[in-house]
Amino acid sequence: MIHICYSGSLDGFDPNLKSCKKSFFKRWFWTFNNNNVDSSTRSGYYFIKAIAVLKRKNLISPEMIQVKWWGKIDKLNQEQINLEGINDFFTIDGYLPKQKSLEKLASADVLFLPLEKTNSSEHRTLFIPGKVFEYLETRKPILALCEDSDCKEILIESGLGICVEPDNIENICSAILKILNDINFLSEIKPNFELIEKYSFKVKTNELVKIFNELEND
């Protein structure tokens, strides 16, 4: 059995509403909104749809794959899971203490990472969430729903990224089936330890301290 896990805030999206339901934290604290960013893919919607498609085609079963999400998970995701009749594939919980969450991530086979895409043809998505670096620390394969971006380049260079178009349900299905059916696929994913260490919180903190010390001595 393969366990695919996600921790943190996960928005809800319904194409019929033409909007993405952002978490309370984002609604309350983020007063700036970039009109070129499409947040619909930073939700569980497309992954849920992929699981539903695979179930209808009898290509997966709950004995083959379990999806575990915890944190601030918008209730719309659970409603869509209920509507698709795929509850037996999913477990959704609230926030966990930091150490407990890290332990659960460390026990996963694959980590789930949905990212927003850009509405502009003139530039790539610039945002790199802190969760990327938290995930890299686990050295676990990362199923990332993402388009071409700096974040995607980091994931691929890390050796851990399994990157697919964020709103292409067929491609997401193909990635899930490859994870499940190719017995060598996950074992052949090897982390780039040098790059992961470069992006570790410890290294970045030391770099920041060095900058402050240099400024203080000027």
Image (cartoon, helix red, strand yellow):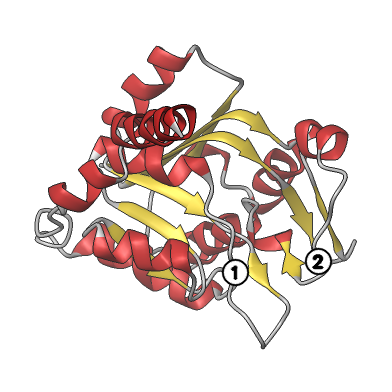
Asked whether residue 65 is in view, the answer is yes
Residue type at mark 1: give it. Thr
* Residue in view at x 81 percent, y 41 percent: 30
Cα–Cα span, label 1 and label 2: 21 Å
> Looking at this view, is 115 or 3 the one in front?
115
**In the rendered image, which residue does mark 2 sit on?**
15
Left or right: residue 32 versus residue 91 is right
The crowd level at tag 2 (other Cα within 10 Å; few <14, some 14-19, many 20+) is few
**In the rendered image, which residue does mark 1 sit on?**
125
Location of residue 154 by image quarter: bottom left
Horizontal and vertical percent position of residue 83: 72, 49
Asked whether residue 62 is in view, the answer is no
> Looking at this view, is 176 or 216 the one in front?
216
From what the image shows, is residue 39 above or below residue 107? below
Location of residue 25 by image quarter: top right
* Residue in view at x 50 percent, y 57 percent: 51
